[in-house]
Image (spheres, rainbow, N blue to C red):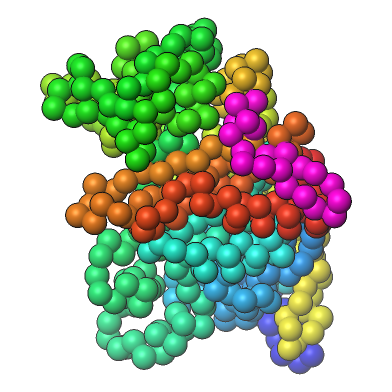
Amino acid sequence: MEVMEKTKFQRRLRVVFAFCMALATVMCYFLLPLSGIAFTDKDAQEQVPQLIEGEKDKLRKEGTALGDIYDRNDTLIVSGQPGGKVEYARDSEKYTMTVGFDETDIGSGYLMERMSEDLRYSDYDNGKGRSLKLTLDCGLQEMLWDGIQQGAGTRASVAVLDAVTGGVMGLAFSPSFSLDELREVKQEWPEKETFKWQDVMLKELVPDGGNQEKLLFPLRWPTRPGSIYKIVTGIGIVENGLQNVVIDDGGALVDDYGPFHVENNDQNTYGPLEFHNAFLNSSNVYFARMSHDYLGWDKMTELANRCMIGVPLECDFAQLLSTFESALDPFDTSVYPNEKLARIGYGYADLQINVVQAAMIAQGIANGGTMCKPYMVETVYTTKGYQTDPETWEYFRGEETESRSGYTKGETYRIASPETAAVIGSTMADAAPGDIQVNGKTYSVALKTGTADLDMEDSTLNNIWMVSYAPADDPRYVVAINRYEVQNSLGIDLFSEVEDIYEYLFQNEERTGGGT
């Protein structure tokens, strides 16, 4: 109790000091011109109020424990502690790559870094930052993490979105790390050397080298989508009335592509195909020809921009990066332009996306052609009350307030008309290998698989994808999975993992509540 009163006194003293400094600055601002000393820079004069507010903010944040973070069901995930520490109420390894961490002597990352203006800002003289309520469901998040660790591949990711709002219900990556691992390394770090958590964890995660940044920041290091991108090309085909045009798939195409020729997976041949059957068979030949002969660069570029591919996207939990061939600057059309245009039609060339963007595309189709910018922070709360338990450092959350961090939810992008989305969605539903049975109920799934080779010496390694939503006739959830450098596997092999996730979602619908 004595310690708490002392802390309150110290903070009040700092607030009084901040007020005095602000008052002194204002007085100087008005009195100096009267004494013959005037500000000569008008911009500097205009900046005075902001500078005063900035100084007050710095003093307000000094000594403030981070706010607490809760899941969608008010389950505590992270608790801010005195001295700039945080404590995970859950297994931190399942959250650090998503929720992140933020400690004064270690650093910060992920959502906690991006939301630090709120987490570090005290609305009251109580030494505690604002609290966050997330769209995540702890049970789902931990189930996703357990599953993604067990499968194949050098790295993997899985995202679950609300099909209507775009809220991130679960987002897990492999490999990951725990906060305790980071702290252990920090304790052994030479005092004279600057501690950078990224450098340390890159060494810990990939001691033998490789492109280590991809492991810590997977949403900034996209990969080739392969056939899941046929959803985007399909939007262009359907809205231009081309779905009944027949392409003869003879198994390979060389015409007009320079030295490169297009082949189907396993060198399959499908014969004459219109859109529906080409999508079900995932014909590379058909989509290459549609992109090259019918849609062209301008249309394929416009489709990518419409779906936010090649456009950096700032979200409250991460920056999403992707690449689109024609968005490169400068774009050299003299180097096999026909080949590049053809390959983009089925998700190749230099086209790259991450798992959240893959989920966004499926979400846009599920939501009648309206794609939502994904978000993870549902509510920002003020933090009322004082320390109630010196051992747990628990605080009460207050009223909902406007975020200071600058991220908003509700931003949408029209990627297709409702009619076009319905055609694509119906075709995705026909592509599913089966329905999902949960507690005697049957749920349909709409999906698209992707299998992209990696242009590596080992030709057996693939980058495999599955994007989906369910129920197909009343979408509530979107699930996307990616596994990188998987040997002798195809995208369809991910269906059992997707099935397990949907079973959890429908069994726990009261907690997960998608589509609300």
Q: Residue at x 42, y 53 (%)?
A: 489
Position of residue 475 relative to residue 192, above or below, is: above
Q: Quadrant of the N terminus?
A: bottom right
Q: Residue at x 43, y 36 (%)?
A: 227
Q: Is residue 291 left or right of residue 77?
A: left
Q: Position of residue 344 (x, y in %)?
A: 34, 28
Q: Position of residue 193 (x, y in %)?
A: 27, 82
Q: Is residue 442 magenta?
A: yes
User: Could one spot residue 490 in this view of the protein?
Assistant: yes
Position of residue 62 relative to residue 187, above or below, is: above
Task: Say how many tags the image has.
Answer: 0
Q: Position of residue 37 (x, y in %)?
A: 39, 46
- Name the one closer to the observer, 449 or 39: 449
Q: Is residue 285 left or right of residue 97?
A: left
- Name the one closer to the observer, 401 or 457: 457
Q: Quadrant of the C terminus?
A: top right
Q: Residue at x 18, y 29 (%)?
A: 260
